[in-house]
Amino acid sequence: MKTALYEGPYYECETDALVLPFFEDDSLDDATLREVDRRLNGSLSSLVAAGELKGKPWETVLLHAPAGVKAQRLLWVGCGRRSECDLEVIRKFGGTAARYLRSRGAKKMALLAPGGTTSGRAAQAMEEGVLLGLFDVGSYKTEDKEEGLIEELVLVVNAGEAADAMQGVERGKITAKAVNFARNLVNEPSSVMTPTEMSERAREMSERFGLDVDILDEPQIKELGMGSFLGVARGSDEPARLIVVTYTPEKITTDETLAFVGKGITFDSGGISLKPSEGMEMMKYDMAGGAAVLGAMRAIAQLRPSVRVFGIVPATENLPSGRAQKPGDVVRSMSGKTIEVVNTDAEGRLILADGISYAKRLGATRIVDLATLTGACVVALGSVYAAILGNDQAMIDDLIAASCASGERLWQLPLHREYREQIKSEIADLKNIGGRKAGTITAAYFLQEFAETTSWVHLDIAGTAWLEEKRPYLSCGPTGMGVRTLIEYAFRSAGGR
Ligand code: BES
Ligand code: ZN
Ligand code: ZN
């Protein structure tokens, strides 16, 4: 899909469908809206009078052959209250319009930004909303393919806005494509998205966008002493991989080096502590943290913030077999700490422990890990917020601020020392489960033991990486949760755009 700007009055724009926003608290007494209604030959006031257009969030009304405009169709999209119109509303407006019109065969559409001005940020949000909204989860369907129907997006801009808006469009395109790249990795069945395949996709992406990439195989992983990671990989016939992607900027404006570490379990059966079969098919998405890291690296390579960033993804399956690790086994991690594996289904923290140690070895001063780590997080926050925990409050605050700007949501949980009691082991330094209470917190506490004094933040995206019900710009399925926040955080770490 290509995007163009139209610098002229909306009613002159020739397109398959012109999309206009309408707010709940809009009144036809307002001079601007009266003028719009007059131009449309009174069709706006009659829709409002008939109660068909109320401005409720994401309501849609389509008019064919509308009077007063050159577009063939006119789509009204309800946007809620005018005072609450922020970038997320603009993203949802774009997503709603794109998905509605695609299902009705439109090839070209033109959007007029809610709020009436198309700043760079607003243009970026619209571009993101449209491209994220058009993501197609049915990649294995042989009929009814939805992809590629909308060929052209036009943003209607005011005089003087074009340069800024075009920059926003570029950023939005890069960001949304990175998110959709991650969603595609997550959407693949585990028979396709093996650790080897994931590393090959990381390699292709890195070569295409000019990142350094290093794929470590099992002998190399063993050489590093990653007994915790390899313990998880033992049960599988698919070899494990440690994916390391490096972004080096032309100029560096900060002493900090970032590392993004993502959980790359390409299928989580639970291992010997086998999961129930109902819902197990979902566990192909247990590499969503790793996919988000690769997606963020893709955008970072194109947008080029002036900070060094490592992307680290330990990738393996978690399967039972005659060789699989068993409850009660003790493994030695790269850090030297020993771990009693009480439950083989708590495998994410085992592979991330070594991933975090490796980030420190590379010289990272700020580590962010992302993982579909606990069912407890799904229970606590559902699919609305991801959990954030860490050992550096300033860094947590920065990530929350980045998430607000990017339209993702993070909610902090406490990481008090007293939770340490729950992961004490009799036989080893730690055990890998902390009992029924505070499952998301004890999992994070376990990871903190490996971050030690390095600034570190953990995002538990178990509830937000996959949606069971669609949203205005997200279909059911993989969301790419984390990609946009990581990109934004990299820029903030480098001191802004
Ligand atoms: N991948 C799961 C967590 C998960 C559950 C993600 C549901 C998405 C949806 C993780 O590896 C796991 O199995 N965690 C266990 C830990 C428990 C054994 C301490 C869990 O949360 O039940
Ligand atoms: Zn598990
Ligand atoms: Zn898992």
Image (cartoon, rainbow, N blue to C red):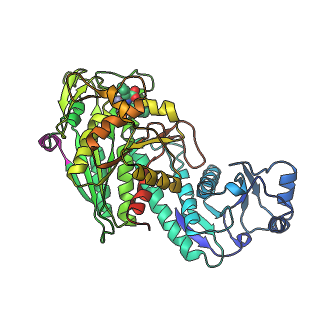
Residue 415, image x and y in percent? Answer: 40, 37
Viewed as shown, does residue 260 lie left or right of 375? left
Q: Quadrant of ligand 2?
A: top left
Using the image as rendered, state which of residue 15 and residue 309 is in the foreground: 309
Using the image as rendered, state which of residue 398 and residue 290 is in the foreground: 398
* Magenta residues, dominant SS class: helix
Residue 391, image x and y in percent? Answer: 36, 45
Q: Check the image and report above or below for 13 versus 203.
A: below
Viewed as shown, does residue 193 lie left or right of 218? right
Magenta-highlighted residues: 216-223
- Whether 221 is among the magenta residues is yes
Q: Is residue 339 in view from this perspective? A: yes
- Whether 128 is among the magenta residues is no
Q: Is residue 190 in view from this perspective? A: no
Q: Check the image and report above or below for 171 versus 178.
A: below
Residue at point 69%, 66% (across, down):
116
Residue 272, image x and y in percent? Answer: 28, 21
Q: Residue furthest bottom?
A: 160
Using the image as rendered, state which of residue 324 and residue 433 is in the foreground: 433
Residue at point 42%, 57% (across, down):
489
Q: Check the image and report above or below for 186 versus 442.
A: below
Query: How many numbered circles are shown?
Result: 0
- Which corner quadrant of the image does residue 353 belong to? top left
- Which corner quadrant of the image does residue 8 belong to? bottom right
Residue 172, image x and y in percent? Answer: 50, 62
- Assign the C terminus to one quadrant of the image: bottom left
